[in-house]
Amino acid sequence: MMTSVPSFYAPKQRSLAGRVTGALVALLLLSAAPKAHAQTWMVSTNAQIKLGILDKYGQLGPYSATFIVHSERTGQDFYLVKELAKGQTGVDVLFPTDPSDPDYFKSEKGEAAAATPGRYTWECRVKGVKAVGGRFVFPEVANDVTVVNR
């Protein structure tokens, strides 16, 4: 004797039911996941070189120090004159300085110096004579940003 079993297989119903179940599970997982809030940072990197001169034994008295920085890449010269008062034997300066600073390196045309990558030479003149000098290289600089999640 043969027993027949009714068929409950309905392929379209299962695929629709599977899609609905999958969508519900995805919504449940997304709603339970913590919300990511990325931190927004403003980033700046600025290279500067400190140059200086010192009358080691304080024999000159007040004097004027003229710093000259030459860019080998552009051929431009940038100047900064510092007046040293009585009792002040030396001074340190930063190259380049912000143009809003009253003492900043500028070209003969008044253009402010920038920290452009490349090789530079510098000297400091006292009473029109080279007293000290040297060279330096500005490197390429870059910023890395890390996203911080709460």
Image (spheres, helix red, strand yellow):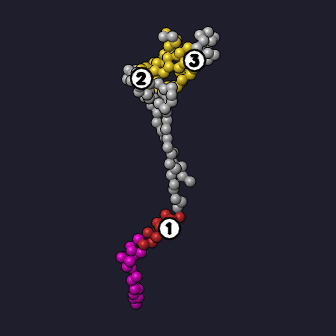
Of marks 2 and 3, the one in the foreground: 3
Query: Could you say where residue 18 lies in the image, as x and y percent from the top left?
Result: 42, 72
**What whole-number distance in Å separates the C-alpha atoms at marks 3 and 1?**
73 Å
**What whole-number distance in Å separates the C-alpha atoms at marks 2 and 3?**
22 Å
Query: Residue tagged by mark 1?
Result: 28
Amino acid under label 2?
Ser
The one of 71 and 146 positioned closer to us in this rendering: 71
Of marks 3 and 1, the one in the foreground: 3
The tag on residue 107 is 2
Query: Could you say where residue 60 lies in the image, as x and y percent from the top left?
Result: 59, 10
Q: Is residue 7 magenta?
A: yes
Q: For the magenta stretch, what is the residue range?
A: 1-19
Among numbered discs 2 and 1, the one appearing first in the sequence? 1
Crowd rating for badge 1 (residues with CA inside 10 Å; few <14, some 14–19, many 20+): few
Q: Is residue 47 magenta?
A: no
Crowd rating for badge 3 (residues with CA inside 10 Å; few <14, some 14–19, many 20+): some
Q: Is residue 23 visible?
A: yes
The secondary element bearing badge 3 is classed as strand
Q: Quadrant of the C terminus?
A: bottom right
The one of 8 and 116 positioned closer to us in this rendering: 116
Above or below, 65 against 34 in this view is: above
Query: Could you say where residue 15 lies in the image, as x and y percent from the top left?
Result: 38, 73
Q: Is residue 73 visible?
A: no
Amino acid under label 1?
Leu
Q: Residue at x 53, y 64 (%)?
A: 32
The secondary element bearing badge 1 is classed as helix
Query: Could you say where residue 105 lies in the image, as x and y percent from the top left?
Result: 47, 24
Query: Residue tagged by mark 3?
Result: 84
Of marks 2 and 1, the one in the foreground: 2
Q: Residue at x 50, y 13 (%)?
A: 125
Amino acid under label 3?
Leu
